[in-house]
Amino acid sequence: MTAQKIIHDQLFLRQKSTLANKMDLPIAFDLRDTLVANQGRAAGLAANMIGQSKRIIAFYAGMLQLIMINPQIIKRSGKYFAKEGCLSLSGERQALRYQRITVTYQDLKLNKMTQEFTGFVAETIQHEVDHCNGILI
């Protein structure tokens, strides 16, 4: 597994990602390696940002790098507007976010998980899930 080049092609990034499965786990590790290689520049990444149109995201929760396979936000509260940047785009843009979210996803063993997140980690997850849905800030 190795760090990959960040994709800037907006036509590609606007495509909805497909569900990931066991065969796509190497993408998850490449995504994590790419996140680590961009530490200090990126709080999170989605697989389409490295050219893989799969529903996989990687992000920091404190010092930990977490990976979610097929994440889906099922609950949100505390609407606010954030100013965000993205490694795939230049500049910053305003985005509607929620302070508290609940996410269902699969871990690296493909076990189903449900977890609540708040604050900046929640904002990062929302940004990356938007990428999976073909939504750019």
Image: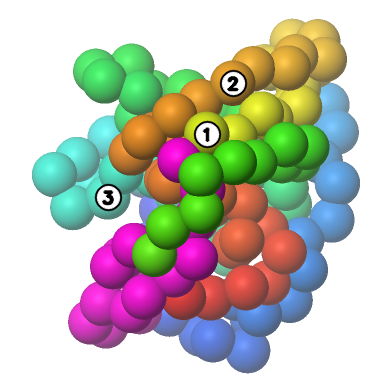
Please state which of residues 2 and 74 is positioned toward the viewer in this rendering. Answer: 74
Describe the element under mark 3 as helix, strand or loop: loop
**Three-letter amino acid code of the residue under disc 2:** Glu
The answer to which of marks 2 and 3 sits earlier in the sequence is 3
Label placed on residue 121: none
For label 1, the crowd category at 10 Å Cα-Cα, with few meaning under 14, some 14 to 19 and many 20 or more, is some
Q: Is residue 19 above or below residue 52?
A: above
Describe the element under mark 1 as helix, strand or loop: strand
Report if the CB atoms under discs 1 and 3 are less than 8 Å apart: no
The residue labelled by disc 2 is 116
Segment colored magenta = 82-99
The answer to which of marks 1 and 3 sits earlier in the sequence is 3
The image quadrant of residue 77 is top right
Foreground: disc 2 or disc 3: 2
Q: Is residue 93 magenta?
A: yes
The residue labelled by disc 3 is 42
**At 84% from the left edge and 56% from the top edge, which residue is drawn?**
18
Residue that lies at the very extreme toward the bottom in this rendered image = 11
